[in-house]
Amino acid sequence: MTSQSEELLSLIGTSAPIVSVRQEIDWAARCDTKVLITGESGVGKEIVARLIHAGSRRCDFPLVTVNCAALTETLLETELFGHVRGSFTGAFRDRTGVLEQAHRGTVFMDEVGETTPRMQGMLLRFLETGEIQRVGSERTDTRVNVRVIAATNRNLVEAVAGKRFREDLYYRLNVMQLHLPPLRGRMDDIPALLSHFLAHFAAHYDVANPVVSPDAMGVLTRYQWPGNVRELKNAAERLIVRSRNGRIDVTDLPVEQLRAGPELPSPAAPGHATADALYESLVTSGQSFWSVVYPPFMSRDITRDDLRFVVHKGLEHTAGSYRMLTERFNMPAHDCKRFLDFLRKHDCHVAFQQFRTTQSPAASR
Ligand SMILES: Nc1ncnc2c1ncn2[C@@H]1O[C@H](COP(=O)(O)OP(=O)(O)O)[C@@H](O)[C@H]1O
Ligand SMILES: [Mg+2]
């Protein structure tokens, strides 16, 4: 086994939540029920799904992952169910979908909370019957035996209440629920995770495993890790890549972690280095908001605060006009509503009224 797959399949941590998650993984591996894994992005939902599959009697059959947020509805439909030749332009031959490919194994449906109502209907039908109808086919093509493990970073109970997620599908998926708390809720795990990832990347880049100074360790274990384990893992990789003398001192740490330290700049004057750089590249590169800001936001590489900062900064220039902001962020005018819906959905809509009494857009240019 490579170090990559070993790393993928060990759940590090000894905090109470992780100990109980480990027990739940064992239990889930022994039975064959559907599992819904919940928790913020980067907490380890995918690794948990892999561990359940690896410990189950399906382990000799495939585990196939589908990221429901990454594909449009049409692409997701062919990805899952497959298609028949000629069903759309470019469908030159029949293709099996991942549900068929995972026969006797497991399908991991990541970000299931992002599916459209029509897709939710199709999933429900599949879960009820196990039948697959390929896109463009007139009849049921086959039946498969797959175990479905789904994950989401959304609160699906709220989504059901708000009619954005079908209640019947929610109950189908949620036979067993496994919740992974954010890393800031189990900070005892930070030192073990940190040494695990430092050792992993030191081996990977063929450098000595560095010694972390007590001060640096103090900063890293106090930091809240809004991007959870994924952020910590990325930070460890960066530290290894940059480490020169086999030691990690406070001065080697990235600014995000430093500014979170209590003795360093206060939260009243947050450093918005990332968001500032993002804003600059947005307004100077000519690239659209959807390609500059949206991807790092969805992958949690930037926070909601960063996004609000970018919007705030833009609105200062447009005197509170979202229509002009759409243009400033290099989106076509008809994207204005989509942009606003996106901001509202993620609670990042900034009230425009506060900008109205200040300068006019012309004056602030
Ligand atoms: N407890 C853990 N022990 C070891 N690695 C972990 C742990 N939690 C998360 N990771 C690693 O962190 C990264 C993000 O985890 P992932 O499972 O993809 O998160 P999520 O699916 O919740 O967004 C992955 O590389 C994963 O292997
Ligand atoms: Mg994930």
Image (cartoon, rainbow, N blue to C red):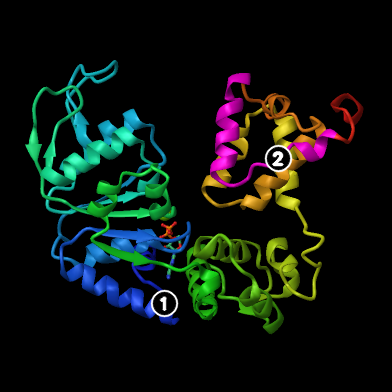
Residue 321 location in percent, x, y?
Answer: 74, 29
Q: Kindly identify the residue that appears in the image at 70 percent across and 50 percent down.
A: 274
In this image, 3 relative to 149: left or right? right
The 10 Å Cα crowd at callout 1, few under 14, some 14 to 19, many 20 or more, is some
Q: Kindly identify the residue that appears in the image at 38 percent across and 54 percent down.
A: 157
- From this view, report whether residue 50 is shown above or below residue 305: below
Residue 8 location in percent, x, y?
Answer: 37, 64
- From this view, report whether residue 96 is shown above or below residue 167: above
In this image, 159 relative to 192: left or right? left
**Residue 311 got which mark?**
2
- Image quadrant assignment for residue 251: bottom right
Q: Kindly identify the residue that appears in the image at 14 percent across and 31 percent down.
A: 133
Q: Kindly identify the residue that appears in the image at 52 percent across and 73 percent down.
A: 185
* Circle 1 SS class: helix
Query: Residue under circle 1?
Result: 17
In this image, 246 relative to 89: left or right? right
- Image quadrant assignment for residue 14: bottom left
Q: Quadrant of the N terminus?
A: bottom left
Task: Indicate yes or no whether the magenta region holds residue 353.
Answer: yes
The 10 Å Cα crowd at callout 2, few under 14, some 14 to 19, many 20 or more, is many
The amino acid type of the residue labelled 1 equals Pro
- C-alpha separation, residue under disc 1 versus residue under disc 2: 36 Å
The amino acid type of the residue labelled 2 equals Val
- From this view, report whether residue 118 is shown above or below residue 247: above
**Residue 246 visible to an observer of this rendering:** no
Residues in magenta? 333-356
